[in-house]
Amino acid sequence: MLTLLTYPAAAGVFSLSPFCVKAALLLQHSGQPWQREDVQDPRKTRYGKLPVLRAGTEVIADSDTIRAWLEARGADFDAGLSASQKAHSRAVIRMAEEHLYFILMLDRWGDPKVWPTIRDTYFTAIPPGLRHVIAGGLRRSVIKGMQVQGLGRFTPEERLARAEQDLTALSALLDANAFLFGPEVTAADLSVAPMLDAMRSTPVETALSRRVGGDPTFTAYLDRVAAAVPLPG
Ligand SMILES: N[C@@H](CCC(=O)N[C@@H](CS)C(=O)NCC(=O)O)C(=O)O
């Protein structure tokens, strides 16, 4: 049995981490039997992050490596796609994971009005007194990282405008098809849907959560992905 080490469920989603949700969807869609194991502290994992997959004595860290591991064992997440569609899919996945994800991070960790709820939702395992200190230190390092990455230098309005460009691109793909690359779920859906779902499920309403949660195309799309690849629990 494969075991997915993931952050716990919260705010009505499988995990607050879109990468943990992605890994769960990949596992579910692969048809391999798997179970979840909730982890609060990722520091001892290979990259100090979750998700991580445990397969007997093997430990596979990073959702993209988990995808490759499953593909090496027969899963075909892009069945039926042409080489050009696969290339396009890879670019869309990077857009979601390397751009929209950081906008989501700043929406959750950067806004002082949102942060207290995030802190008390993410770090329930730490007693309240200590929680302020530990979570506050993590928040400072996230904000510093976002300054280096660059998106942290934009105003919230500028970030929303950049998110809008990506959301418009995703909407255009969904105007043509039920899923991003056709009538069936493919790898891009398993990355993009968790990112959109995370954006709308930030436990405090923000301009971004309103934008995604209020979009009928995304709402119908997220329902379709949830129906096509139902996660346990
Ligand atoms: N590239 C990684 C990203 C995983 C990731 O960023 N995980 C975050 C949660 S969404 C994490 O565990 N962060 C902990 C930390 O950076 O300390 C993947 O695809 O798995």
Image (cartoon, grey):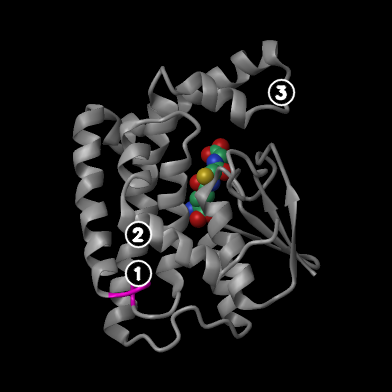
Q: Which residue is mark 1?
A: 90
Q: Residue at x 61, y 76 (%)?
A: 30
Q: Which residue is mark 3?
A: 126
Dot 2 falls on a residue whose secondary structure is helix
Residue 65 place in picture, x, y as percent: 55, 65
Q: Along the horizontal axis of the image, is 198 left or right of 96?
A: right
Residue 97 place in picture, x, y as percent: 39, 53
Q: Which residue is mark 2?
A: 94
**Contact? badges 1 and 2 (CB < 8 Å):** yes
Q: Along the horizontal axis of the image, is 97 left or right of 6?
A: left
Residues drawn in magenta: 177-181
Distance of label 2 from label 3 (alpha carbons): 33 Å
Q: Residue at x 34, y 70 (%)?
A: 180
Is 122 situated above or below 169?
Answer: above
Dot 3 falls on a residue whose secondary structure is loop
Image quadrant containing the N terminus:
bottom right
Q: Residue at x 26, y 45 (%)?
A: 163
The answer to whether residue 72 is visible is yes
Q: Is residue 178 magenta?
A: yes
The answer to whether residue 192 is visible is no
Residue neighbourhood size for the residue with mark 1, other residues' Cα within 10 Å, grouped as few (<14), some (14–19), many (≥20): few
